[in-house]
Image (spheres, grey):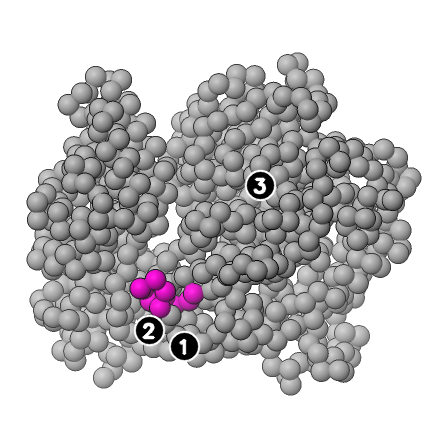
Amino acid sequence: MDVCVAVNRGLRVVSKAAGFFSAAFTAHVESPSLLLRTFHKIPKVAPRESKGMRMRMRFGTFDYAPSDTGGFEVATPGTNVRSVAFPHPTTVVSASRDHTVRLWKLQTSEPPSFDCTIKSHGKEFVNSLAIVPPSSLYPEGLIASSGKDQIIDVRQPDKSLDDNAEALLIGHGNNVCALDASADGKLVISGSWDYSARVWEVGKWSESTELSGHEASVWAVLAYDGATIITGCADKKIRIFRPTGALVRTIQTGDVVRALCRLPANHPSGAHFASAGNDAIIRLWNLDGRQIYELHGHENFIYSLAALPDGRLVSSGEDRTARIWENQQCVQTITHPAISVWTVAASENGDIVTGASDRIVRIFTRATERYADPAAITQFSDEVSSSSIPQQAVGDVNKEQLPGPEFLTQKSGTKEGQVQMIKETNGNVSAYQWSSAANQWVMIGTVVDQAGSSGRKISFNGKEYDYVFDVDIEDGKPPLKLPYNLSQNPYEVARKFCEDNKLPLTYLDQVTNFIVQNTQGATMGQAPSQSTDVWGTGSRYRPGDAAPAAADAPQQPPTPKSKVLPQKTYLDIMTANHKVILKKLQEFNQQLVNDGQKALSFNPSDIDQITATVTSLEKGDSKSIDSAGVDLIVKAATTWPTEKRLPGLDLLRLLFASDETVAYLTQEQNIIHALGDSGVFSDSSAPNNTMMAIRSLSNLFKSESGRTAANAEFDTIHAFISPFLQASARNLIIAITTIYINYSVLLSLDVNADRVLTLLNDLAKILSKVADSEAVYRALVATGTLLCLGRDFCEAGRDILQIQSVTQQAAERVREPRVKNVVAEIQEKLQE
């Protein structure tokens, strides 16, 4: 029996409207014990049984402008294919959440057939992959892969599964989500959730050079050349390093960076590399940090980028598409019958390969000799057209205002990939996408109705949340609860949820995207969405079932929001990777020991005490924290050399959130004055240290003892903060505006006119300059909440502090619905 048919319900191929061609490889197979109920249950196939599976490839044409194209696909049942590589036109390598890395070799060309060999089979999900080019040391090159187990597995491609790995690289403290290799075969670069990237010298595996300074997960790495390494980070920055670890340049981008790729030399745009991420924009950059172009077309997260030899770009993402870009224009959109197109890679012959959440790897080509057969093309087209698109993904569709099927023959699209909603004769709403190459509308799915969310505050584990989502696991098991407040970072909430519940890391992006979509991207203070719930009644989310937004769908006005002002709850900044913080503190301590600074360094028993304290913090067991551990953390935060204080300050931030530890810190340690005496609020302080200290002060409001201290030390805290009101560091301003929100809530319980006017004056200064959307929004919420304390404050804000004009200016700088809404509330309040 043909293995592909038996395991994957038959071969599948890309549709004619999609562009290149596609054919089916085989199966990444995983144990059903971790499958969610939305996945097909399939028999577990042992690695030895899967090894060397052979299957047929079917080929056919695709309309890839400016000429027809074709392709083939690789089936991977029950898995998300998270990374692919295309080292040679006859070789594809894929990595998947079924714990395997597979190498596919072309066996015959007409029709094409491939042999699959498993090269590694671990115990955790594999989500990053890199091919080390051949060298004198490794004539066949190397395959490097990694993922949730934090170990980078390096293997020679010609070795069997039974052979030992060439090297197992250990150094990261969390999931390794990005890998790349230099073109000369000398370096491997890795990026991780542990806020770091590392450089590994090929053949000298015992050590690595850390690329430090990242403030969040490193989602993308690029070995640009032998002297230049580029990283993309969830802190919305691109960094350029030397292999020695020296930072050359930091580039601020518009959003989380998930993908990087090198552009061919003498690229027509003049750019050197490209980046993309959560804002669905591809940006082209010079190495000097200057942005050359922005490419718009994707409608959701972009996960992957690749450059073809002729300079065209290929991108893929959460909007179900891979897109081809030429001369800064999208020339083809290839819609997949999948939730996410996680990864894309290009071959030297111009073919491209994609990996998706529907467990298929597809190869697309413009070469007629590799076309799929017509039946396979038709099958793929049917799968795309029969896809279901949740209504929330396309907005509040008004059926009565939609055109009928006649629109499809009477009007052409205005650009490649444009999506048009059509009311069919049976009353259904279908989505059609414009194909410039085919010069026609192609059906890509049917819009389905879903129930709406209630928008009520929900109590969970003694706390109130804007949302508590249900996450279904296997049949017979109760759903997991995902609590979320709009004051939280959705990416960090999703990550912690997956880690706490030991869920597949492949769900991280889908959970994040689900949160963003179902809260309309709000970050803080915005009323819960009244829009439809894409996951069904009760805000139930099933990882793996998400459907992306359709491109260029008609957007209807959102459902009116409830009032944001006044803010009534305190905000905190609690997200943390405890193990990473502890590891960094231990590294710095060892450096102090090595430098002979015994008066500052900790001995082994001290480290044990700190470890116990961090463990209690991670478990939420503040009552078991010993004061000795708190004292040691205060020492690291206030007396260590400036460049080594950040881990101590980060742990102090977490200690500030507990009533027991705050009482000790404020009453016994006089910690607020100790922070001031440490110089952390001086002009010469490292910006990250100042930011972390202010985050700590923000967390004071989480407990009764902390609020008492914050009230008593208002003048002191204000003196600390006021010099930084117009600082350019985003995280610093967000921390400051968070404190101002918390003080505005505290003042609503005991109005102090002098303090209200002081804060309003400060907020006017912030709003007159700051352009970051989150900082502006928080400053507006704090301002509006203070104005709600009385008519006198509104008069002072209007007539003396110019609140009316600065809020209008802020709305001009940050054109977001949530900003517009809260500014409208403030303007209304000022007119009372």
Does residue 243 appear to the left or right of 573 in the view shown? Answer: right
Q: Residue 588 magenta-drawn?
A: no
Q: Can residue 104 be seen?
A: no
Which mark lies nearer to you, 3 or 1? 3
Seen at 52% across and 66% down, the residue is 540
Residue 579: quadrant of the picture: top left
Locate the N terminus and report the quarter of the image it occupies: top right
| Amino acid at the residue labelled 3 | Phe
> In this rendering, is residue 643 above or below 260?
above
Does residue 194 appear to the left or right of 670 in the view shown? Answer: right
Seen at 34% across and 41% down, the residue is 578
| Amino acid at the residue labelled 1 | Lys
Q: Residue 399: horizontal and vertical position, in percent? A: 64, 82
In terms of sequence position, does the residue under pointer 2 or pointer 3 come before the other?
3
Q: Which residue is mark 2?
A: 564
Which mark lies nearer to you, 2 or 3? 3
Secondary element type, mark 2: loop
Seen at 29% across and 80% down, the residue is 828
Picture disc at residue 125? 3
Chief secondary structure of the magenta span?
Answer: strand
| Amino acid at the residue labelled 2 | Val
Residue 652: quadrant of the picture: top left
Q: Residues within 10 Å of mark 3 (few under 14, many from 20)?
A: many
Does residue 648 appear to the left or right of 302 in the view shown? Answer: left
Q: Residues within 10 Å of mark 2 (few under 14, many from 20)?
A: some
> In this rendering, is residue 87 above or below 614?
above
Q: Which residue is mark 1?
A: 561
Q: Residue 45: horizontal and vertical position, in percent? A: 72, 41
Kindly indicate whether the residue at mark 2 contacts the one at mark 1 (C-beta within 8 angstroms): yes
Q: Can residue 596 be seen?
A: yes
